[in-house]
Image (tube, grey):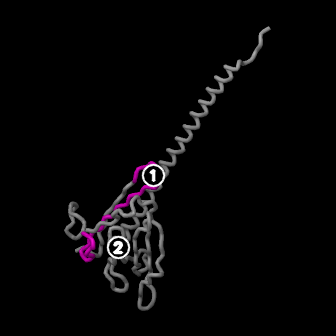
Amino acid sequence: MEKHGFSLIEILVTLGIFSLIILVLVNFQISLFSQNTFISNSLNADSEMRTALKKMVAEIRGAAQSDTGAYQIGTATKNSLTFFSDVNGDGRREQIRYFLIGTSLMRGLIKPTGNPLTYVVGSETLTTLVHSIANPNQEIFAYYDQNYAGTQTALAEPINIPLVRLIKITLTVDADPNKPPAPLTLGSQVSIRSLKY
């Protein structure tokens, strides 16, 4: 009489093959999830920087003398810029400040108030424009005078503010320096309309 069934060796081989298939599928799923995170992080960083650059360029281009008579640009350093611009179309020029806090590029806005009008420092509204700036010491802003033709070096710090006619903005983002994606860099340049000769 013949016995039907599997031998112990056949069961062990089947379990081994089944375990290998499961291991391959789990690794594939982990890889797929990792790639999805990689692509999502890249797209989010790109979108955040493009939105910030578009806003910054528009606001800087419209820089004008403040409602208190102050010059168009208040401060200018490699990672901070303060200027005046009517950003909400109400006929009043707000004080706009772009600056770094840690690895975040921030935007501060102060609306002029009172009679006579003043810009009250404590009334600044802060928003985060870009997260995960790759290097908090990086040069976000570079300033150029009226002679800029594309090859000149930027004005040296401390910036002689009345010479500034063009501002280059460079943003580099890296959500996690130890993991992909590699740092992403975008930039733009803007001329201040009210300072063109």
Q: Amino acid at mark 1?
A: Ser
| Quarter placement of the C terminus | bottom left
| Quarter placement of the N terminus | top right
| Residue at 56%, 40% in the rendered image | 29
In this rendering, would 114 be left or right of 167? right
Q: Is the residue 123 above or below the residue 172 in the image? A: below
Q: Residues within 10 Å of mark 2 (few under 14, many from 20)?
A: many
Q: Is residue 167 magenta?
A: yes
Per the rendering, the mark at residue 62 is 2
Q: Amino acid at mark 2?
A: Gly
- In percent of width and height, residue 161 lies at 27, 76
In this rendering, would 192 be left or right of 176? left
Q: Is the residue 190 above or below the residue 7 in the image? A: below
Q: Is residue 48 magenta?
A: no
Per the rendering, the mark at residue 155 is none
Q: Which residues are magenta?
A: 156-183
Q: Is the residue 154 above or below the residue 2 in the image? A: below
- In percent of width and height, residue 170 lies at 34, 61
Please give the residue where the numbered disc 1 appears in the rendered image: 42
Predominant secondary structure in magenta? loop
